[in-house]
Image (tube, coloured by chain):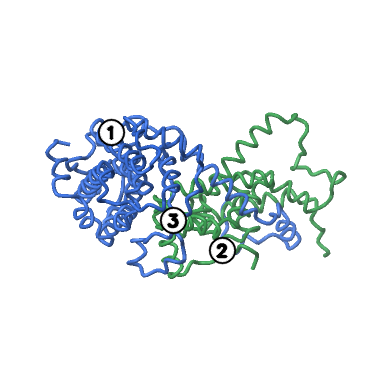
Amino acid sequence: MPPGTPSSVPHAGRDAERVLVRRVVGGDRAAERALYDAHVERVYRLAYRLAGEDDLARDITQDTFIRAFARLPDFRHDASLATWLHRVALSVALNTLDKVQRVRRHEAPLDAGLDAAAPDRRADPDLTTQLAAAIDALPPRYRAVFVMHDVEGYTHDEIGTALGVRAGTSKAQLFHARANLRQRLAAFRRPDPT
Amino acid sequence: MSFPDDRHDAPLEPALQAAARAYHVPPPVPADAMWRAIEARRGAESVAPPTREWARPTPRGAALAAAAAVLLAVGVGLGRYSTHPSTRADVPASGRTVAATLATNGGTTSPPARPESPPRPDALSAAEGENRATYAPTRRPDVAPSLALGAARRARAADVSRPFSPSDAASAPLRAATDEHLAHAEALLTAFGADDSAAGTLAAGGPAERGGPAGTAPDSAWARDLLGTTRLLLDSPAGRDPARRALLETLELVLVQIARLPRADTPDERAFIERAIRRGDLMARLRSAVPSGSASGLVARGT
């Protein structure tokens, strides 16, 4: 099972979660740190997978927890705390990355980027590198779903809750993401031996 | 393109799956560094310039809070300076001078930092039968601190050896300010208990204007005012009396909860706070702590 694979929260865990949230809302600083320690790794991993840079990942993670602590009094325990946190994290990440991309697009010369639709095998034939470029080129939501499911191991239920969509929509977006990647990487596929 | 079901959406080929797992591999999580950054940002936000709720105080509530704060500051100043041999003749004339003098003394003499408070009794956890040692609650200054608050803490640290004596004549103003504050707290909690979840009614002594900042319940603004004074009292000589301190700490916990209530609070949220009030026996303790006549005085003044 890949690291960070989500698991269902048992009933006893949900009760402990409610108590922890109450303590945090009551201003208990130790409880705040406990909540942070319990969830920071998965939030940071998700942020880093999406951002690809430590500075951005830290900003996204910090913004996520600051926003979460501010909104925790409104948390209704409809979903697990982890799922709710990931929803906040994803919202922060997508907004942050959108702003960063707009700034960088504005700053970079128009002809400086690689054309991911037609990978130049002479430049770098490495599959990992080309796949990374193809993932980077995915539409943000497709990329988020792909990274969460195929890379970090989230379930479609968790992804749906994080994105505010149904699990079926998450599946559809994953399907399109995979199809997009296969198309972009068709040149790297090994020919059928038969 | 129609969406196929899971039978037709094959996972990526093994080579692509392996390459995908290598996408933006995260380094070890810099948890401590990020936590320090989070604390720094939240601390900066907590001492930010007053928000709308502070910049636009309600007329009646602001007058009450100001009167209590002036009485308290005068009491703290008189209590400290009347017991200090070198300053008996230097009792300041106004509350503002008291605060400035305390701040000056705190800056020049630099008494040792006050040690962390011992874990407070958590009225919420008692009923849930938890192990309180799991967490060591510490006070979180999420209300904008005042100079007098910080100065009072430093002054108290320098004078911690002298216990507060309720019978001390010099502490009479402080005692009066404390009693008045507790009476206001009792009024708030009475109003809170009488409120419905959607709209509240105001008991005597509550703010005239029902609006708090956008998104917060009307009682929240009142609770925030009282929370600041409660914390000032905890750090004043009034907080040295064990029974009074225990009452103020329980009150602080409840005020924090009320202060954070959103405007559209739910019956569950209010019931949760009301349970905390009952578990801490807070109403009975407030009534026994406030001398008869103090609360009625508030009502008589038409506040």
Dot 1 falls on which chain? Answer: B
Dot 3 falls on which chain? Answer: B
Specify the label residue A6 is tagged with.
2
Residue B56 lies left or right of residue A138; in this view the side is left
Q: Amino acid at mark 1?
A: Ala
- Coordinates of residue B186 in the picture (x, y in percent): 22, 49
Residue B22 position (above or below residue B218): below
Q: Residue at label 1?
A: B62
Discs 2, 1 touching: Cβ within 8 Å: no
Q: Amino acid at mark 3?
A: Ser
Mark 3 lies on a secondary structure that is loop
Residue A153 lies left or right of residue B228; in this view the side is right
In blue, which chain? B
Mark 2 lies on a secondary structure that is loop
- Coordinates of residue B175 in the picture (x, y in percent): 26, 46
Specify the label residue B117 is tagged with.
3
Q: How far apart are labels 2 and 1 at the CA level? A: 50 Å
Q: Could you classify mark 2 by the number of other residues whose Cα lies within 10 Å: few (under 14), some (14-19), or many (20 or more)?
A: some
Residue at 35 percent across and 34 percent down: it is B89
Q: How far apart are labels 3 and 1 at the CA level? A: 30 Å
Q: How far apart are labels 3 and 2 at the CA level? A: 38 Å
Q: Amino acid at mark 2?
A: Pro
